[in-house]
Structure formats: structure tokens, C-alpha cells
Amino acid sequence: MEPTLFSKIIDREISADIVYEDEHVLAFNDINPQAPTHVLIIPKKPIATLNDIGESDLALVGRLTYTAAKLAKQFGFAEDGYRVVMNCNEHGGQSVYHIHMHLLGGRRMQWPPG
Ligand code: AMP
């Protein structure tokens, strides 16, 4: 897999506004925010799409969700509510081929998402 923009952010070749990091996961503010808080949570392991997640990645993917909830509490909108989104491939609107969870909060969300 070619290094993506997000691998370059992990490797600090490209700067980002990092809000959380641990051994497995990195989270940083989206450059084009769609809500008052819009954070991208990514695994450090490069996995191109949701379709490429294997059995051995299940704990890692769970960690993305766990991190989203932890950050929502930290940002103070966990009780009001928030949205997490993972886009897959062209029809899903995926533009960076390194899986990422969008955490959107700080406003009321609409449904359907369009
Ligand atoms: P997706 O369209 O689901 O693949 O999401 C990719 C996201 O990455 C978009 O919301 C972009 O705004 C965001 N993005 C692109 N480049 C950067 C960057 N350099 N730093 C932070 N977020 C970025």
C-alpha cells in the first residue's frame, strides 16, 4: 500500500492538529470541519478501506469507537449526542484510503445524511 496522506501525518511528514495519540490510534482535527468539532480518528496501522478489515483488526477497530466516545466526553458533547461516520469507497464518499472514523459534535445532526 502506498503511503497515504494519513500515514504521512502519523509519521509527522505532514503536520496536523493532533488531539489524541496512543500506541495504536491517532486523532486530529479535520482540515475542513463539518461541525463545531470534527475529528478524524485513525489506526496507526494502514488499512485502506472497511472492506480490508480482517479478524485480527477487530480490537483495533473497536479502539476507534472507544476513542470517539472518550473524546466526545472530553469535548463535552457526549450527553447531548454526536455522530461517528466511516465512509467506504467511491459511493460512500471516501477520499483518503486509510480507514478513519469521523467524530462530529457540537451541533444537532440531520438525517438522512445525503
Ligand atoms: P473521507 O472523505 O471520509 O475519506 O474523509 C477524509 C477527510 O480528510 C475529509 O473530511 C478531509 O477534510 C480530511 N482531510 C484531508 N486532508 C487533511 C489534512 N491534511 N488534515 C486533516 N484532515 C484532512
Image (tube, helix red, strand yellow):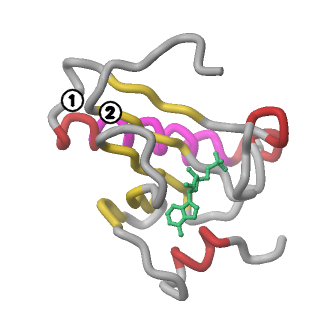
- Where is residue 38 drawn, in percent x and y? 39, 45
Please tell me whether residue 106 is drawn above or below residue 75 in the rendered image: above
> Hey, which residue is sitting farthest bottom in the picture?
13
Considering only order in the chain, which callout, 1 or 2, is on the residue closer to the N terminus? Answer: 1
Q: Which residue is mark 1?
A: 77
Part of the protein shown in magenta = 57-70
**Secondary structure predominantly adopted by residues drawn in magenta:** helix
Q: In the visual, does 66 lie left or right of 114? A: left
Residue 105: mark: 2
Residue 85 occupies quadrant: top right
Which residue is painted at 53% across and 55% down in the image? 42
Which residue is painted at 40% across and 36% down in the image? 104
Quadrant where the N terminus is found in the figure:
bottom right
Q: Residues within 10 Å of mark 1 (few under 14, many from 20)?
A: some
Q: In the visual, does 79 lie left or right of 34? A: left
Please tell me whether residue 19 is drawn above or below residue 91 in the rendered image: below
Residue 21: mark: none
Which residue is painted at 37% across and 38% down in the image? 35
Q: Residues within 10 Å of mark 2 (few under 14, many from 20)?
A: many
- Where is residue 26 drawn, in percent x and y? 44, 62
Q: Is mark 1 within 8 Å of ligand 1?
A: no
Q: Amino acid at mark 2?
A: Gly
Q: Amino acid at mark 1?
A: Phe
Q: Nearer the viewer, residue 8 or 46?
A: 8
Please tell me whether residue 49 is drawn above or below residue 72 in the rendered image: below
The kind of secondary structure element at disc 2 is strand
Q: In the visual, does 41 lie left or right of 36? A: right
Residue 28 occupies quadrant: bottom left
